[in-house]
Image (spheres, rainbow, N blue to C red):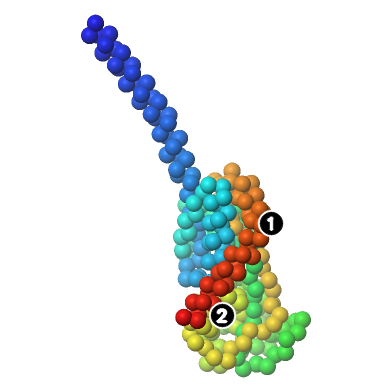
Amino acid sequence: MNKKIVLCLTRSLLIFVFVSVNILVPMSVKSEELSLTFTKVSGEHNKITVAAIKILSEAYKNIGINVIVESLPSKRALYMSNMGITDGELNRVDNIDLTYTELIKVPVSYLSIKHMAWTKTLDVPNSDSINLTPYTIGFNRGYLFAESYAKGMDTYVAGTSQQIFKMLDLGRIKVVIAPDYAGNNVITELNLQGIKMLQPPLDTTPVFHYLHKKNKHLLERITGSLVQMQKDGRFKEIITQVETEFKNAKGQ
């Protein structure tokens, strides 16, 4: 009789353990899938980056996933995401996946970058095209658009936007190439006077979100979420909200 009781208890315990494992394991796997970590370039607190975080956070929330953003130097961020150490890139220009082949572009451009020329001493009229060939062009090291645009021209390259704009302010260089948001941020931060942004933009570059290939199964879902947000006008609403926040911060 005691043996039967022990046998029954043993069987019950095994069944309980089996059921618990089958329930708990999927739950733990599911909880891991509920968060994704994307890299962004460190030191970039600007309207584009803040809007990108808000847009992607909402897009992923719509499909039940939480977004974590990790700040890293530009090349290291790409290395980490391309190796699959992180889950992808927050926002990058088009065709980055041609070089970093483990990344997949989510085919919805939700923001764009305006590449602008900035000057203090030149009186350059606004026109359909700006000829900057006669001048020394300053820009950030690693700024791919500026490197391509100024190829063959006299250039001055520094490690930060602050250094470049200080050189412009001191009259050491005549022109700086920088995104509109970056230039405005630095001018405000350093309280620079008399620097103007030339129109029209030298170019406008669409920005895309990239996933590592390990997350390929999410491509269709996140694409659909972004498309729906675009149709609902959420991109414009979030961008407007961020612009207002930055204006209010400057006024304080």
Q: Residue at x 56, y 47 (%)?
A: 63
Does 65 sit above or below residue 51? Answer: above
Mark drawn on residue 184: 2
Camera-side residue of 252 and 37: 252
Q: Given the current orientation, which residue lies at the most extreme right position?
A: 128
Q: Residue at x 53, y 74 (%)?
A: 246
What kind of element bears circle 2? helix
- Count numbered badges in the picture: 2
Q: Quadrant of the N terminus?
A: top left
Left-right relation of 212 to 204: left
Q: Given the current orientation, which residue lies at the most extreme top position?
A: 1
Crowdedness near tag 1: few (<14), some (14–19) or many (≥20) residues, C-alpha within 10 Å: few
Q: Residue at x 63, y 70 (%)?
A: 113
- Location of residue 22 in the rendering, given as x and y in whole percent from the top left corner: 43, 29
- Location of residue 87 in the rendering, given as x and y in whole percent from the top left corner: 51, 52
| Residue named by callout 1 | 231
Q: Quadrant of residue 11?
A: top left
Q: Is residue 80 visible?
A: no
Left-right relation of 10 to 40: left
Q: Given the current orientation, which residue lies at the most extreme left position?
A: 2
Does 111 sit above or below residue 188? Answer: above
Left-right relation of 175 to 200: left
- Location of residue 24 in the rendering, given as x and y in whole percent from the top left corner: 40, 34
User: Which residue type carries mark 2?
Assistant: Asn
In front: label 2 or label 1: 1
Crowdedness near tag 2: few (<14), some (14–19) or many (≥20) residues, C-alpha within 10 Å: some
What kind of element bears circle 1? helix
Does 36 sit above or below residue 175? Answer: above
Q: Quadrant of residue 136?
A: bottom right
